[in-house]
Image (cartoon, grey):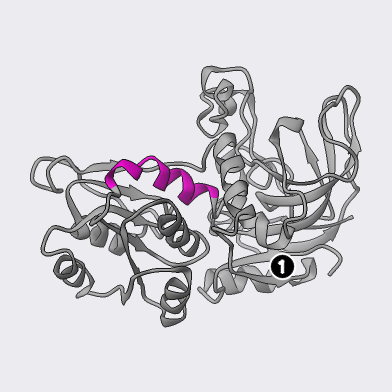
Amino acid sequence: MKAVQYVEFGKPVEVREIPAPEPGPGQVLLRVTAAGVCHSDIFVMSRPPADFGFAAPLTLGHEGAGVVAALGEGVTGPNIGDAVVVYGPWGCGTCHACAQGRENYCPRAAELGIRPPGLGAPGALAEYLLIDDPRHLVPIGDLDPVRTVPLTDAGLTPYHAIKRSLDKLYAGSTAVVIGVGGLGHIGVQLLRALSAARVIALDVSEDKLELARASGAHLAITSDAKAADIVREATDGRGAQLVLDFAGVQPTVDLAAKCAAVESDLTIVGIGGGTLPVGFGLIPYECSVSTPYWGSRAELIELIDLARRGAVQAHVETFALDDAPEVYDRLHHGRINGRAVLVPGS
């Protein structure tokens, strides 16, 4: 089968022919219908594979949608031909966190060598994907897999981040979204669908600010030296009750702190490496700072239900598997509007 692989540190991805996997006991084989491309892939490829504890080559892609193609011995639940998406942050399945569906916070995954597809295990940027357990599959019915697959990360991550702060998003409150890329534009939609907050979006790109407006932002402004002052002015000097930083680089982390209100939540979602000093007088009083990771299985089910109701939809650009090297180059240089999705066989 054809697969997009990270083969050598410092080199572009390669589209290669590799053997198709076969499901063993308890496993499920998917014929991939759509797979998302993410900045996290670039983060993984920014270091030698040994730094992450896996060996190259690695098939990339942690956002996967597909049709059940084969079932391993003993598998019950999914049927051949079912359309599904994949819950990515796999855990041990038996600990306290996993028992609640919060496999994204499984404390045993690392020691057991359990890794998400595309981030250590073979991923979805291929014609077929092997799933280690049917519990990681969420049915999508007749939803378009191309527009639905980004919800498994680009949707689930902001959904989890926003849901934990909903008590602060009362009528008259403000939420600031910094970075309106693959995650941020879905974050804007979720804020509008789930809360009464006014949504202010910040980005350096006019194309992405236009995407923010189309996604429902009440105000979209350039992320520059004046941005924090504009947010303060728009909130009568108070700042925002929730600030979501989807970039996580040092300038956006600094900006996030300047936009936050007293008793606010400041949530750094992006993995750009920025840091925030926390201490008395350094951030607003009772400002809670968090760095969430992905979301729970239950939250992915909830998110798919929101998509089925038309409350959220990813803006996507579609490509063939053979286009992967160009797609990653465009993503690295900020030339993807929304989310890039590769479609095997297209």
Is 191 in front, or is 30?
Answer: 191
Q: Position of residue 334 (x, y in %)?
A: 50, 73
Q: Position of residue 141 (x, y in %)?
A: 76, 49
Instruction: Label 1: state its secondary structure.
Output: helix
Residue 158: x %, y % from top left: 46, 51
Residue 94 picture quarter: top right
- With 334 as the anchor, is 127 left or right in this view? right
Front-most of residues 35 and 6:
35
| Residue farthest left in this picture | 281
Residues in magenta, as a range: 156-168
The correct choice, above or below, for 130 with respect to 199 in the image is: above
Q: Looking at the picture, how far across and down is residue 58, in whole percent?
A: 72, 49
Single out the residue that lies furthest toward the bottom.
206
In percent of the image, x 71 and y 62: which residue is there?
146
Q: Residue at x 58, y 63 (%)?
A: 314
The image quarter in which residue 135 lies:
top right
Amino acid identity at mark 1: Ala
Q: Which residue is mark 1?
A: 324
Quadrant where the image shows the C terminus: bottom right
Dot 1 alpha-carbon crowd within 10 angstroms: few under 14, some 14 to 19, many 20 or more: many
Q: Left or right of 207: which side holds 144? A: right
Q: Nearer the viewer, residue 80 or 104?
A: 80
Query: Residue at 57% across / 47% down in the picture?
Result: 303
**Image quadrant in which the N terminus is located:** bottom right
Tell me if residue 88 is in the magenta stretch. Answer: no
Q: Main secondary structure of the magenta part?
A: helix
Residue at left 54%, top 58%?
A: 311
| Any part of residue 22 in sight | no
